Amino acid sequence: MKQTKGVSTNDFDYLRQLVGEHTAVVLSAEKIYLAELHLQPIAESTGFAAIAELVAHLQTQPFNNLHVQTIEALVTNETLFFRDRHPFEALKQYILPELIEKRAIERSLNIWCAGCSNGQEPYSIAMLIREHFPLLTNWSVRLIASDFSTKVLARAQKGHYNQLEIKRGLPKNLRDKYFHRLDNSWQIKEEIRQMAEFHQLNLMQSWSSLPEIDVIFLRNVLIYYDIATKKALLTKVKQQLRTDGYLFLGSAETTINLDGSFKQVSFNKSICYQLHNV
Ligand SMILES: C[S@@+](CC[C@H](N)C(=O)[O-])C[C@H]1O[C@@H](n2cnc3c(N)ncnc32)[C@H](O)[C@@H]1O
């Protein structure tokens, strides 16, 4: 059997299936390096000499916390503050001003970051709101951030970032205004932290706990799914989005050829999506 630095192709096939069944994330064959990189520490901390032993153990056990840890270690959490910049510009210049006008009577807005990873995306939105929309302090604004992974949610909820993370995408003026400096890291201030609510939500399961949403950030999540899952997810998005709401996807993602109910809307360099009937 082919063995690659401790992870056989058979073991990786089992791991791929485990991740796919739980999250729908498709791990292609070349992602075997993820297993090599991330599973050794889990194997060691749980008393297994090698990844192969960890995998053999997982295969004989009913689904438990070790399976969850393994899945979380294999799913990509790459994120940064104000990722791709343009969606946040569109939100600031066009979308929030438009929605504030439209919702002036109800004075309420729901924004959802689906697949929020370590929190940089929802906190970018929170800082943008605090900086540019003081009027919203008197509104009911729900900034909902969700992920299937309790590991990333725990980090997101803390709002504590290392030097490398803080340097990625966050302008210095916002860093100095909204973070406390600790020894070698940064803690987001409570006024921003409490603007976001974090929930565990597996996108493959029910969304019934969510309200209707005005703006959905579902960025850099669809790329990990197969076509059938992307389509199924966009059908759920359609039901969750207010009829005049906006959907943001990642820069390598689109609804085109997946779901004809969405139209592309461009704001300068940013593309987002709305339902056709708007
Ligand atoms: C690459 S990160 C993107 C983070 C952020 N949206 C961004 O664009 O910077 C993808 C996130 O989606 C989450 N994710 C993947 N599959 C999921 C699922 N089935 N349910 C909920 N979250 C999922 C992962 O845990 C990860 O944190």
Image (cartoon, rainbow, N blue to C red):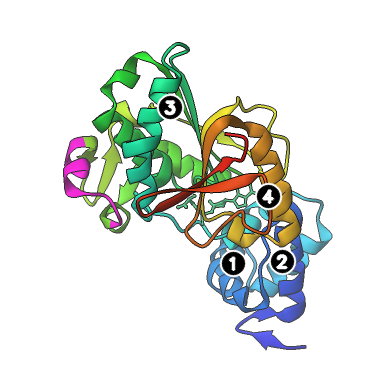
**Amino acid at the residue labelled 1:** Leu
Q: Nearer the viewer, residue 21 or 87?
A: 87
Q: In the figure, is residue 27 to the left or right of 141?
A: right
Q: Which residue is disc 4 drawn over? A: 260
Q: Nearer the viewer, mark 2 or mark 1?
A: 2
Q: Nearer the viewer, residue 240 or 164?
A: 240
Could you tell which of marks 4 and 3 lies nearer the N-terminus?
A: 3
Q: Nearer the viewer, residue 177 or 73?
A: 177
Could you tell which of marks 2 and 1 lies nearer the N-terminus?
A: 2
Q: Nearer the viewer, mark 4 or mark 2?
A: 4
Which residues are drawn in magenta? Answer: 168-177
Label 4 and label 3: CA atoms lie apart by 24 Å
Q: Which residue is disc 3 drawn over? A: 99
Location of the C terminus by quadrant is top right
Horizontal and vertical percent position of residue 54? 69, 66
Label 2 and label 1: CA atoms lie apart by 11 Å
Q: Nearer the viewer, mark 4 or mark 3?
A: 4
Q: Quadrant of residue 238?
A: top right
Residue 191 highlighted magenta (yes or no): no
Q: In the figure, is residue 253 to the left or right of 178?
A: right
Q: Which residue is disc 1 drawn over? A: 39
**Amino acid at the residue labelled 4:** Gly
**Amino acid at the residue labelled 2:** Leu
Q: Which residue is disc 2 drawn over? A: 15
